[in-house]
C-alpha cells in the first residue's frame, strides 16, 4: 500500500461536513456547559473587554464580521 492509500485509510473522507469532528465538538461543548465554569469564563471575557486586550478583541470581531453572512433572522425574531 503506498502512502496516498494509507493516508486515505487513516483519515476517512466523510463527505460534506465532518460528522466525527462535529460530534467531538458538540460533546466538548456539552461537557463545558455542565462543568460549572460558564459564569467564570463569562466574567473573564467581560474583564478582557475592559482590559488591555480590548483593541485586539475588537479587531478580531471586525474581521469575523467581514466574513459573516449576517445576523441570523431567528435571533431577532425571538427577542
Image: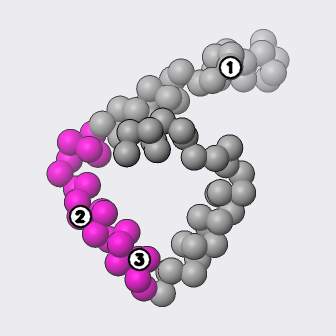
Residue depicted at 59% across the width and 64% down the height: 61
Q: Calculate the distance from the C-alpha at mark 3 to the C-alpha at mark 1.
A: 36 Å
Residue 63, which numbered label?
none
Mark 2 vs 3: CB contact within 8 A: no
- Quick one: 78 or 4, which is closer to the camera? 78
State left or right for residue 14 relative to residue 33.
right
Query: What span is colored magenta in the figure?
Result: 31-51
The stretch drawn in magenta includes residue 47: yes
The relative height of residue 54 versus residue 13 in the rendered view (above or below) is below
- Quick one: 48 or 69, which is closer to the camera? 69
Q: Residues within 10 Å of mark 3 (few under 14, many from 20)?
A: some
State left or right for residue 12 relative to residue 3.
left
Pointer 3 or 1: first along the chain: 1
The residue indicated by pointer 1 is 16
The residue indicated by pointer 3 is 48
- Quick one: 70 or 1, which is closer to the camera? 70
Amino acid at each position: 500500500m503506498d502512502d496516498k492509500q494509507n493516508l486515505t485509510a487513516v483519515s476517512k473522507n466523510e463527505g460534506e461536513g465532518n460528522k466525527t469532528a462535529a460530534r467531538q465538538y458538540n460533546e466538548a461543548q456539552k461537557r463545558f456547559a455542565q462543568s460549572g465554569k460558564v459564569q467564570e469564563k463569562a466574567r473573564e471575557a467581560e474583564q478582557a473587554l475592559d482590559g488591555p486586550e480590548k483593541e485586539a478583541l475588537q479587531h478580531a470581531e471586525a474581521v469575523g464580521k467581514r466574513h459573516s453572512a449576517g445576523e441570523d433572522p431567528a435571533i431577532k425574531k425571538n427577542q
